[in-house]
Amino acid sequence: MKKAFLLIALLLAAMLLAGCAAKEDTQFPETSSALQVDPMSVTASAGTASTEEQQQDEFDWDSYDPSREEDNNASAYVEGVVYDDLGNAVYAGATPIPLDPIDMPTPTPRPALTFVYGPVDPPNIGITFEAPAGWQADASQQDTIVITDPNQYDGFNATMTVSITPVDRSYKLNDVKTTVRDKLKEIGQYNYTKWETTSLSARTLLKKDGFYANYRGEYYDGTVVRGRVMVALLDDSRIITLHMACPGWYNESYMNVVAHFRDTVKLK
């Protein structure tokens, strides 16, 4: 009897434990390996790009130039100039290196030249005018007079050349501009390592309309020459051409000679 009661009690206990186990399985199911996801393998779903992919799509690799990331100041370095670690120009020792044209020394101004004028009546050109006394005149060329300052300054003797030449009947005032430009080109293509000209300006000569331009050039030896070319259209299909060439540092003084010529020149 006692054995039967003990057997029934064991059966009831077993049934109770089995019910608890079933309840636990319902509340806490075992995680299936099929549902586990490695966070390092996550990819964006179709139609949605990741941030990195969006950046790559927006960057134009075809136009990428890697040289833009290099030092852009490298091409600005000048031979003979000393630079610090930051690329700034410095002086070598106690002697400053001039950086042209920023801190080049200002040339010493030359004293103004003064002239005493006298009449010039060349036999071959049909004009009279006044020029500095003592200048040497050369009338050997037809329709041309060349007068030269015998005094040399900065390695150059000033010369003023005046000529009167015929032109075609179709030649108009606008053609004077071309003549001035052609003359400047002719002068500048020889002997000069540097050559600069101004734009054309209107100016009368012998009371006739014309144009002129100034120039500045440097010879191979460093001699600076400045000058002016002036052309005016005369009656009877002729032009008068004036060319003054002078030492560069005395340009203002010699332009006064040109002004005096304009004031005194007359047709015979």
Image: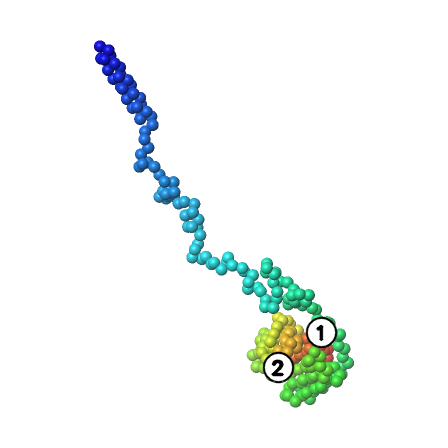
- Is 37 drawn above or below residue 263 in the view shown? above
Q: Position of residue 236 (x, y in %)?
A: 62, 82
Disc 1 residue type? Answer: Glu
Where, quadrant-wise, is the C terminus in this rendering?
Answer: bottom right
- Is 239 drawn above or below residue 89 in the view shown? below
The crowding category of the residue bearing disc 2, from other C-alpha atoms within 10 Å (few below 14, some 14 to 19, many at least 20), is: some
| Residue drawn at x 71%, y 74% as measured from the top left | 252
> How far apart in space, not on screen, are marks 2 and 1 (Cα)?
29 Å
> Which of the two residues, 119 or 160, is positioned nearer the viewer here?
160
The crowding category of the residue bearing disc 1, from other C-alpha atoms within 10 Å (few below 14, some 14 to 19, many at least 20), is: some
Disc 2 residue type? Answer: Arg
| Residue drawn at x 73%, y 82% as measured from the top left | 151
Where, quadrant-wise, is the N terminus in this rendering?
Answer: top left
**Residue highlighted by disc 2:** 238
Q: Secondary structure at mark 1?
A: helix
| Residue drawn at x 74%, y 81% as measured from the top left | 132
Of the two numbered discs 2 and 1 in the rendering, the one whose residue sits closer to the viewer: 1
> Which of the two residues, 152 or 55, is positioned nearer the viewer here?
55
Q: Position of residue 146 (x, y in %)?
A: 67, 84
Q: Position of residue 198 (x, y in %)?
A: 63, 71
**Residue highlighted by disc 1:** 252
Q: Is residue 232 visible?
A: no
N-term mark: 2 or 1: 2
Looking at the image, the residue that sits furthest to the top is 1
Residue 221 in which image quadrant: bottom right
| Residue drawn at x 33%, y 32% as measured from the top left | 31
Residue 40 is marked as none
Q: Secondary structure at mark 2?
A: strand
